[in-house]
Image (cartoon, rainbow, N blue to C red):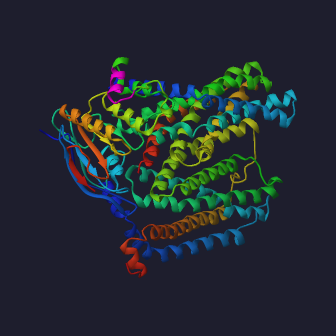
Amino acid sequence: MIKKWLIEMGSPPLFYKWSTKTLPWLFISAILILGIGLSWGLLFAPTDYKQGDVYRILYIHVPSAILGQSIFMFMAFCGFINVIWRAKISGMMLKSAAPIGVSFTLLALVTGSIWGKPTWGTWWVWDARLTSTLILFFIYAALIGLHSTIEDKTKADRAVSILSIVGLAIIPVIKKSVDWWQTLHQPSTFTITSSPSMSPDMYQPLLLCLVGFYLFFALLLTLNLRNEILERERTRNWVKQLLGVSS
Amino acid sequence: MHSSIFDSLSIILKRDLMIAFRRSSTYITPLIFFLIVVTFFPLALGPQESLLSSLAPGVIWIAALLASLLAVETIFSEDFRDGTLDDFFISLEPSFILVFAKVTIHWLITGLPILAASSIAAIILYLPLDSFIPMLLSLLLGTSFMSLLGALGAALALGKSAILSAIIVLPFSVPTLLMGTSVITSSLNNQDFSGFLMIMGAMLALGIPGLCLLTVEALLLNYE
Amino acid sequence: MLPNLKVENLSCVRSDKSIFDDVSFDVLPGHNIEIIGSNGSGKTTLLRTLLGLITQDRGEIVWLDDAGKYHNYRTFECLYQGHQLGIKNLLTVFENLNITKHAKGMSQEDIYKHLERVGLSNVNELASNISVGQRKRIAMAKWLLKEFKIYFIDEPFSALDDTATLLIEKLIKELNVKGCSFVITGHRPSGIEATRVEI
């Protein structure tokens, strides 16, 4: 029953046709909300009394860090479906989401580092959050690396699905163990992102940015996935018809 | 049925141990690698006793981690090449139990020698004698988990480069590294370390069924 | 007599290419199936699909159990020999037979007898030192360890000299009489009595 539904909904041609309709809406809403959120945060939100304008990088850092993790969850979810029901589209989704996820994670690391220079005085601090983000980045790298070594794409999808499931199980353990590791080595640290009270006029644009980032991810994922579908189904008749190639 | 599972397990163990003993490099290479890596630290950092003893937990663990992943690619590659791996999936016994046998063998020929050599490493790095037992316990649990994780990596990268199977699982070994070093460091500081050991034990207990099942899935991919 | 294995309309598609399509046959006790096809026609994939190593895209594979009912999972143990024969290089000829679960409870003499049957006398030689033809003979000796209901053998007749070919034909005939069936593959029809299935 579920399998049947998944196969019908997860059919690449159906998804492709459906996404052609929704793509403009997704595009408009992503650009609009991200634009409002970012300009609100970067230009109009009040200046922090302690950090000055430097703190504004948070409007990029925090959403990209959250996205980096959420995209991994999403990938592991796709991986789970791919391993259990062998739904082809879930494998393609996983593959398409990986480069986006690793980019957001990298963005979080870079912005965190840029933020660290004026606040901590160094480019890198072994802060618990930054450390687990770095390991998340390595896990993404492992997944992408594995995918690229297996020629058969369907097989590669399944292999990466299996590894992403392990990732899903082990990431909470990594986060927890990094926390313990830090308390063992440096008992109290100053964390920037959880400043005790964030005023609503700083918080609201952050929330908007976060929604904007999610929409942006959905947009990128759809575009990536459409490419992936076309590439893999290029020998199929529906793609040939779509592209006007005579078969 | 039960006796038949144990028969299959003991046959695999017997066969593979016999083969391992006929080719001594399988168990000597990780051992030597471990000792060389450990020796390089004092050579690179200088022989001060206080420095080395405070770095010892980390050094021993990094060396053990790398050494146990060194031979990981061989877990399935030879069986896949000569066709004996097919039997895992043709027999009526659950395949993950047979995968567990292969993991056990990998641990016996890498983890166990490392465990034995870790005492030598601890002596040359001036680790206090009181920390020997915690070190051995953490290595016992940790290298077992690494064998499980390594088996998955080997299954996923079967027939690909040997280093790939190690690299794709290295990021997943972070908790093991952190918990393992924490056990030894805590014992150096006279703190309670049983909590870390319990978590390592829990990871192992969940990892045995979970990782073995995923390894079966990964192995089957190679038949398509 | 009921067939031990029924294959109905089996199809397998990989990366948009049909590997085999609409294959059907029954494996009756004591009867053989020979799958004929050229190189790369999916003979090995078909064998692996039958044994459940690969999931089929369409069609049914059902196995008979002792109670006379059919199931879509395998109910009895089979012997499978792929292109790689499952021979360990670092074990001797004797050990390659002795250290398998099918040889359990078998005396040393029994195993020597089987090895002699297939014409192997250098029992204490490491398998890495023997020729391809002799490796094939070790594989044949494994057939004798136990009577399986169905033997799945991938290209048993390739790389064999005439005496070995005759030996295989004889062994298969003997096992057929005992009610065992063979499902084998090949490029062209062999000398054994079998229902040919072309893919």
* Residue A145, horizontal then vertical, whole percent: 59, 54
- Residue ID at (30%, 29%): C144
Viewer-closest of B162 and B22: B22
- Residue ID at (32%, 43%): C51
* Residue B169, horizontal then vertical, whole percent: 59, 44
Magenta stretch: helix, strand or loop mostly: helix
Q: Which residues are magenta?
A: C110-120
**Where on the picture, by quarter, is residue A106?**
bottom right
C43 horizontally vs B14: left or right: left
Looking at the image, can residue A63 be seen?
A: no
- Residue ID at (64%, 53%): A137
Q: Relative to C108, is B36 above or below?
A: below
- Residue ID at (37%, 74%): A238
Looking at the image, can residue A206 be seen?
A: yes
Viewer-closest of C94 and B24: C94
Magenta-drawn stretch contains C66: no
* Residue B111, horizontal then vertical, whole percent: 61, 29
**Where on the picture, by quarter, is residue C123?**
top left
Viewer-closest of A85 and A42: A85
B168 horizontally vs B101: left or right: right
